[in-house]
Image: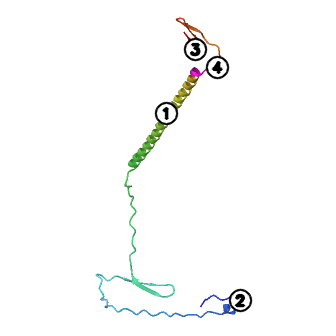
Amino acid sequence: MNEPTAYGSSAAYETAAVEVHTPTPIVPVHTAPLMPVQPGAIPAVASIVLPDGRVVTGYALTPMQPDPVTTVKPAVSRAAVNTALGGVGFLAVCGGLLLLTSFIAALAAFIHQLIILAAVVFGGWVAVQVFSASDHRGGTTVNIRKAVIKRNKFYG
């Protein structure tokens, strides 16, 4: 049934066999007979005639009334909510101020490092100027107790 066939085969046009399933009836289960119980009071029986002439008979039920709507106070007062929100806002401001002070401290440390870097670079430049060998041949002659220093050489 529904097996693939070769393309163009005449078997493709044949109908498949149909299987018919008949349901098996459910055997009723025999239980103990129910004992009728009389209600405390016999309810009133109401009958209604439908427009097509049928009569519907049944017990009259009183419709359930919904509970009256009562205004329920919120579990938390508005003042408590406002106080809590104010506290959250205060914490947010404190956090912002903490970040601001941290930013200012970091900026001050950065400026301090720049000043130290400038001092080191400037000091190095001065040291190079002082201790570098000069190319000029002119020198200063200084007489100290008959000793002569000329062109950075001591003649004594």
Reading the image, the residue beneath label 1 is 109
Lower position in the chain sequence, tag 3 or tag 4: 4
Q: Which mark is residue 8?
A: 2
Lower position in the chain sequence, tag 2 or tag 4: 2
Q: Is residue 129 above or below residue 97?
A: above
Q: Where is residue 125 in the image (x, y as percent from the top left)?
A: 58, 25
Cβ–Cβ under 8 Å for marks 2 and 4: no
Q: Is residue 21 left or right of residue 90?
A: right
The colour mode here is rainbow
Residue 132 in magenta stretch: yes
Lower position in the chain sequence, tag 3 or tag 2: 2
Q: Residue 153 carries which label?
A: 3
Give me the C-alpha separation between circle 1 and circle 4.
42 Å
Cβ–Cβ under 8 Å for marks 1 and 3: no
Q: In this view, does 139 lie above or below 68?
A: above
Q: Image quadrant of residue 32?
A: bottom left
For badge 1, the amino acid type reads Ala
Q: Is residue 153 left or right of residue 11?
A: left
Lower position in the chain sequence, tag 1 or tag 4: 1
Which region is colored magenta? Answer: 129-134
Reading the image, the residue beneath label 4 is 135
